[in-house]
Image (tube, rainbow, N blue to C red):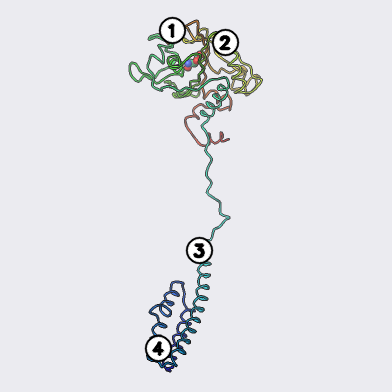
Amino acid sequence: MSNTSAQKLDSIQNAAQTAFKAASSSKDLYDLKVQFLGKSGSLTEIMKEMASMSKEEKPLFGKKVNEVKQLLEAVYSEAEEALKKNEISAKMAAEELDLTLPGFARSKGSQHPVNMVIEEIFGIMSRLGYSIRTGPLIEKDYYNFEALNIPADHPARDMQDTFFIDKTHVLRTHTSPIQIHSLETEALPLRVIGTGPVFRCDSDISHLPNFHQIEALCVDEKVSMADLKGTISFFVREYFGAGLKTRFRPSFFPFTEPSAEVDCSCPICKGKGCSLCKHTGWIEIGGCGLVNPKVFHAAKIEYPKYQGFAFGFGIERMAIIKYGIEDIRLFPENDVRFLRQFVK
Ligand code: DAH
């Protein structure tokens, strides 16, 4: 074996060992591996010197090169493992999670109280066989007034301050026009709940220009005031709680005859008298009556074969009474401090 080749091999081994151990990153280490052990690296290069060696020298030198190669590969693996360990711990230290930091709290949404009340009322009425209807917000004068027995220039129109769109269209002032749409299009007998926003040119601590109503219409053969009273009393008990009384006061609505105003005993003071019921023990919740034959006539329904009753309540009012809300203007404001109270 030529002395110089052996010396070269030794120095390659030393240089590689030192370099592998000193490498500061996996990438540098890998580059060094290519440099010393790669296809055109130092060891491959030195093997070429075998060409000029004698028959006896060749296997000895070959063996030596292999030993050096194995040794260097072992040193490489050791260095590689050490570097990887360091790199992982450095990465972990850099990305350390502080599990004691407060998380990102997502506030919980809630249904708007108006929708809660609609859903609750519908839940009660659906048990009596009623289905829900909505209807257009911009109504023909005919549906909002005429067909409900409120002719043009009739003083009853003054009961509801109206937003006019043009000469024949209004923003509906109540949900009662939904009754007419159902009477015109649906098969009898009929039990429907009409609900949604309504609009009146009115605004103070107890009135909003846009509020919501819910309305029931039942049409069948032989429907009487007793059915109406039974249905409303059931509804009041289910909605406000058992033990509440219902009272009917004669009143006037053009689309019902006879008509009545519905009061229930105050759910807050249970009839003893408080500020909500103005110390009367009773709270007005809406209007009702038997469907006026003139309404049936307008909708081309055979009367007295078919008879019916209807009642209508303000949704915000139903929520105010049930939850003791003091200002109706809180409903459209959508202040989360108000809405949050209704998170279930
Ligand atoms: N539509 C009436 C209003 O807004 C409320 C009403 C009264 C509805 C009597 C009815 C009813 O269905 O029978 O003032």
Q: Is mark 2 within 8 Å of ligand 1?
A: no
Q: Position of residue 191 (x, y in %)?
A: 52, 17
Circle 3 is placed at which residue position? 94
Label located before the other in sequence (3 or 4): 4
> Within 10 Å of the Cα at label 2, are there few (<14), some (14-19), or many (20+) other Cα atoms?
few
Residue that sits furthest to the front in the current view = 55
Q: What residue is drawn where x is 40% and y is 15%?
A: 143
Mark found first going from the N terminus, 2 or 1:
2
The image quadrant that residue 169 belongs to is top left
Residue type, mark 1 in image: His
Q: Secondary structure at mark 2?
A: strand
Callout 4: SS: helix
First of labels 4, 1 by sequence position: 4
Which callout, 2 or 1, points to the residue nearer the camera? 1
Gap between marks 3 and 4 measured at Cα:
50 Å
* Residue 283 in the image: above or below residue 109: above
State the CA–CA distance, disc 4 to disc 1: 118 Å
- Give the total number of marks visible in the rendering: 4
| Distance (Cα) linking label 2 and label 4 | 121 Å
The residue beneath circle 4 is 50
Q: Which residue is mark 1?
A: 297
Give how far across and how far down residue 33 sits, in percent: 44, 77
2 or 4: tag closer to the N-terminus: 4
Q: Position of residue 291 (x, y in %)?
A: 50, 10
Q: Which residue position is annotated with label 2?
A: 249
* Foreground pick, 303 / 251: 303
In front: 6, or 252? Answer: 6
